[in-house]
Amino acid sequence: MEIKYLPAKLMRPSFGACFPATHIIWINEDLPEIVKAFVLQHELYHYTDTAKNWFIREVKANFYAARKHPLGFVCTAILSLSPYRLAFYLKRFKEGR
C-alpha cells in the first residue's frame, strides 16, 4: 500500500481518500499532525471495510480512528465545521455517497 501526502489544493474538500483497488491512500499534507494521524487511521479502516452503505462505512471508520486518536478525532471534528466542509457533507448526504 502506498500512502501519499498531497497539498490541500489537490485534496479539498477531502481530508483523505482511500483507493483499495489501487492500494493507495491520499492524505491532505496541510492538516495539523494530530489530524493527519486520525485521518490516516480513518482511511486505513476504509482499506479493508466491505460495508456497502457509505454512511455506515464513515461511522465505522470514524469510530475505529477515534479509538486510536481521540484528540485527533476532536480536532478533525472542529476543522470539519468550516463552510467548505459542511457543504461537502451536505452534498454527500444529498447524493447518498
Image: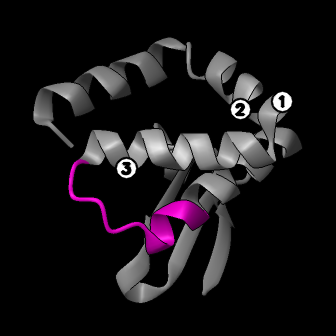
Coordinates of residue 16 in the picture (x, y in percent): 55, 52
Q: In the image, is residue 90 above or below residue 12? A: above
Coordinates of residue 4 in the picture (x, y in percent): 65, 72
Residue at 48% across, 72% down: 47
User: 97 or 9, which lies in front?
Assistant: 97
Q: Secondary structure at mark 1?
A: helix
Residue at 67% across, 16% down: 78
Which numbered marker is on residue 71? Answer: 1
Residue at 79% across, 51% down: 37
Quarter of the image containing the N terminus? bottom right
Identified by mark 3, the residue type is Arg
Which residue is identified by label 2?
73
Residues under numbered marks 1 and 2 in contact, where contact means CB atoms less than 8 Å apart: yes
Quarter of the image containing the C terminus? top left
Calculate the distance from the C-alpha at mark 1 to the C-alpha at mark 3.
21 Å
Which numbered marker is on residue 57? Answer: 3
Residues under numbered marks 3 and 2 in contact, where contact means CB atoms less than 8 Å apart: no
Report whether 12 appears left or right of 41: left
Residue extent of the magenta highlight: 44-53
Identified by mark 2, the residue type is Phe
Residue 30 shows up from this direction: no
Calculate the distance from the C-alpha at mark 1 to the C-alpha at mark 2.
5 Å
Report whether 30 appears left or right of 44: right
Coordinates of residue 2 in the picture (x, y in percent): 63, 84
